[in-house]
Amino acid sequence: MSVATEKQAKSGGAGETVKIIIQALILALIVRTLLFQPFSIPSGSMKETLLIDDYLFVSKYAYGYSRYSLPFGGFGLLGDGRIWSAPPERGDIVVFKLPRDGSTDYIKRVIGMPGDRVQVQGGVLYINDEEVQRTYVGTYDDGGFRAEEYQETLPNGITYTVLDRGPNGPEDNTQVFEVPPDHYFMMGDNRDNSTDSRVPPTSGGVGYVPFENLVGRAEIIFFSVEEGSGAWQFWKWPWTVRWDRMFKIL
């Protein structure tokens, strides 16, 4: 092989490598933008369903697309509302943009649908004036947080675990909230440690969440490490990874 031919072969090989890398990056961008986006959990508001330093995938396509679910607001191409929209189901765990600033990501559970009446009395949830069934499970204690644990079942049959320190927490006795059209009422599963729709935006809370603010539905925990250990500290993984939470369907 001549020197010129050898140089051409090397140049062609390098070009193919660059082409493959670019294609992979484009594919990853498409997947992240339109299909699945990774999120990490920064707070304990969804204990014990979600723990701090859980890493999960959120399906972007579940509810269609809006300027809040696409990077850079979809460059202004979508305007208001959603395309290919499908409403969430009661009980879905949803990532959404905080209504009062339109940029901060929150994750909560959909409790109230448009037109619903939602109230909490003595720590017990009521939807449309009907008490939501809950069953006492026991005491939750992770060494730094202690609360009573209940299985709560929504009217559509979705069951999940909630934590409640007692019947007279800050948001355990509320007014009746009437959810406006195209809005949703969100609550954290850790009822006494969650800033959610029970607190209005004027008081630093969430309030009702517009449909267009939804980013996507939480689907699966793909990685989890002990709180504060840092996922990037890979040399600690054998001891800090919460193996029992890996690939947990939500």
Image: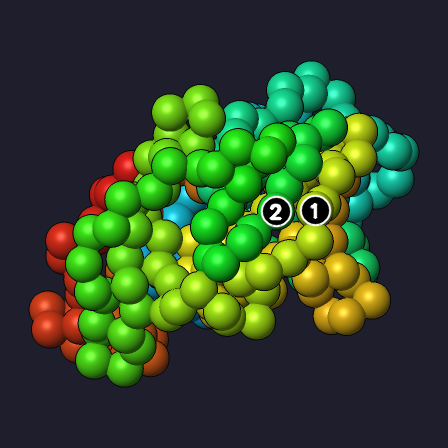
Q: Nearer the viewer, residue 165 or 41?
A: 165
Q: Position of residue 153 (x, y in %)?
A: 37, 35
> Which labelled disc corresponds to residue 91?
none
Which corner quadrant of the image does residue 205 belong to?
Answer: bottom right
- Residue pointed to by mark 1: 176
In this view, the residue farthest toward the left is 238
- Residue 18 visible (yes or no): no
Task: Please tell me which residue is depicted at 39% across the width and 68% down the height of the picture.
Answer: 166
Q: Position of residue 145 (x, y in %)?
A: 30, 77
Q: Position of residue 160 (x, y in %)?
A: 33, 41
Callout 2 secondary element: strand
- Dot 2 amino acid type: Gln
In the image, residue 48 sits, relative to residue 153, either above or below, namely below
- Residue 167 visible (yes or no): yes
Q: Nearer the viewer, residue 181 or 123?
A: 123
Is tag 1's residue or tag 2's residue first in the polypeptide sequence?
2
Q: Left of 151 or right of it: where is 4?
A: right
- Residue pointed to by mark 2: 119
- Dot 1 amino acid type: Val
